[in-house]
Image (cartoon, helix red, strand yellow):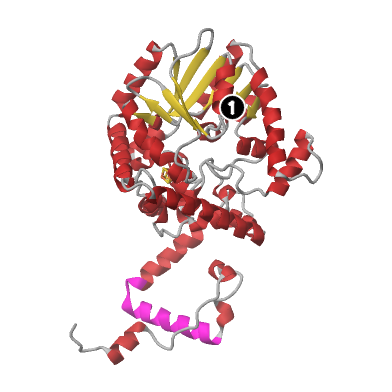
Amino acid sequence: MSTVKDHAELAQVFNNDEKRVDWHDETLWFVRAKRDRASHGIPDWELLRETASQIKHNVLSNMHNYLVQFEDKALANGVKVHWAANAAEHNAIVLSILKEKGIDRMVKSKSMLTEECHLNDFLQDNGVEVIDSDLGERIVQLAKEPPSHIVLPCIHKKKEEIGDIFHEHLGTAAGESDPQILTETARQHLREVFLTRRAALTGVNFAIAETGEFVVCTNEGNADMGAHLADVHIASMGFEKLIPQRKHLSVFLRLLTRSATGQPITTYSSHFKKPRPGQQMHIIIVDNGRSIQLGREDFRNSLKCIRCGACMNTCPVYRRSGGHSYHTAVAGPIGSILAPNLDMKKYSDLPFASTLCGSCSNVCPVKIDIHDQLYKWRQVIVKNGYSTKTKTAMMKGMTLALSSPAIFNFSGKAGRLALKFIPFAVNNGLNPWYKQRDMPAPPEGSFTDWYKKNRKGEKS
Ligand code: SF4
């Protein structure tokens, strides 16, 4: 495998375990079907999607005002507000807050932003222990793996594998894979963590400009446990998490979990407005490439994303290639739009990891034109010279063939003859298409031949 990570090569690794691929595919499709049932239960679903999209459109167009308004209100509420231009600044701010308080152990609930910033590794390198408190995140943390899905971080793992991880790290009996017993073990383990950590970091699902408060959605209540028991609460948010007013929250809360897991509402949607007496509350507002994406007209709508994961659950490529094949914090269709913005060369493979079927755009609760953006990224990547040498050569060959009828007809004839008489020239291990598919039998003649014979002179 080459040193530059490539989705197709990493997907091949996942595909080596066929049973896992089938089970991963079916499980995510089950979640997608639940989402369909939940959305069909709301007559105004399409209106809700359109409303959410328009609210976010307003936010993206007035970001400068809403950010200032949010900061003013948060400061007035007694919250300390920090601004981070990039991942390094974000991580340094978290460390400085902890150092100032002499804290070297922290509990953290789910935050894809901290995955994006590689916060855990940074803190560990600086002598701070971080324990993830979301159950799925804790499992992948113990397995020393990144999450493979933004909502279901360990969806790629079977319960037997989780049993082995718990046996090694949390002392459950060898071979124990009963979900009830494993969950209870995690509960006891995390309880001790919640009670002993003086700092808690949470993500932010929605930040309300009107009031300066922020809302964190979890199904396990782990963000609340950490934040309520800690002396210091740090909340990390990408600046696109803003919504203008509290009343807008109802639109997003109705969409979020129905789209994510098919539940009518997240179990805990907790509002944090001001620190309790004696507590410190910090909000770190992070850019890390978002303002560049905001300035890319074709891609700015990707900042409307509320991280529900629906586009992943429905994507035929994601379901059969696994989240780790995307080699970035946010996998799947939306990750393939966000990642090239951060590093076009490193993630130039991702916009091509799609069938462009449009299913992602159809399920997106904020109506992001995901598949159109993937198609546009392909053009940008090719124009900037980041497509692979093979693909560039093939495209040049196609341009030549398609711009000359003589070459096109000759190539078609040569291809048909090759498939008929020397099929191994096309159907061999060097042809990635042939690795997992049969080539169709070659037609006897070209469409032009058929048309001349059957239709020439006909009037439509
Ligand atoms: S792009 Fe849309 S469907 Fe995908 S995670 Fe974001 S909000 Fe959900």
Residue at the image position 34 percent from the left and 30 percent from the top: 243
Q: Do we see residue 377 in this rendering? A: no
| Numbered range of the magenta stretch | 402-421
Number of callouts in the render? 1
Work out whether 37 lies above or below 450.
above
Which quadrant does ligand 1 occupy? top left
Q: Main secondary structure of the magenta part?
A: helix
Work out whether 203 lies above or below 172.
above
Q: Quadrant of the C terminus?
A: bottom left
Residue at the image position 79 percent from the left and 35 percent from the top: 171
Q: Quadrant of the N terminus?
A: bottom right
Task: Tell me where residue 251 appears, x and y as whole percent.
Answer: 35, 36
Task: Tell me where residue 392 appears, x and y as whole percent.
Answer: 45, 60
Look at mark 1 in the image and give the residue it sits on: 108
Tell me, yes or no, whether the highlighted magenta stretch contains residue 419. Answer: yes
- What amino acid type is highlighted by mark number 1? Lys
For label 1, being within 8 Å of ligand 1 is answered no
Tell me, yes or no, whether the highlighted magenta stretch contains residue 175. Answer: no
Q: Do we see residue 46 in this rendering? A: yes
Q: Nearer the viewer, residue 339 or 23?
A: 23
Task: Tell me where residue 395 appears, x and y as whole percent.
Answer: 42, 64
Q: Which corner quadrant of the image does residue 394 belong to? A: bottom left
Query: Is residue 16 toward the left or the right of residue 360 in the image?
Result: right
Q: Nearer the viewer, residue 428 or 179?
A: 179
- Residue at the limit of the structure toward the top, as seen here: 278
Residue at the image position 72 percent from the left and 47 percent from the top: 161
Q: Circle 1 — which element? A: strand
- Residue at the limit of the structure toward the left, as seen here: 459
Q: Nearer the viewer, residue 434 or 25?
A: 25
Task: Tell me where residue 409 appears, x and y as whole percent.
Answer: 37, 81
Circle 1 crowding by C-alpha within 10 Å: few under 14, some 14–19, many from 20 = many
Residue at the image position 60 percent from the left and 60 percent from the top: 22
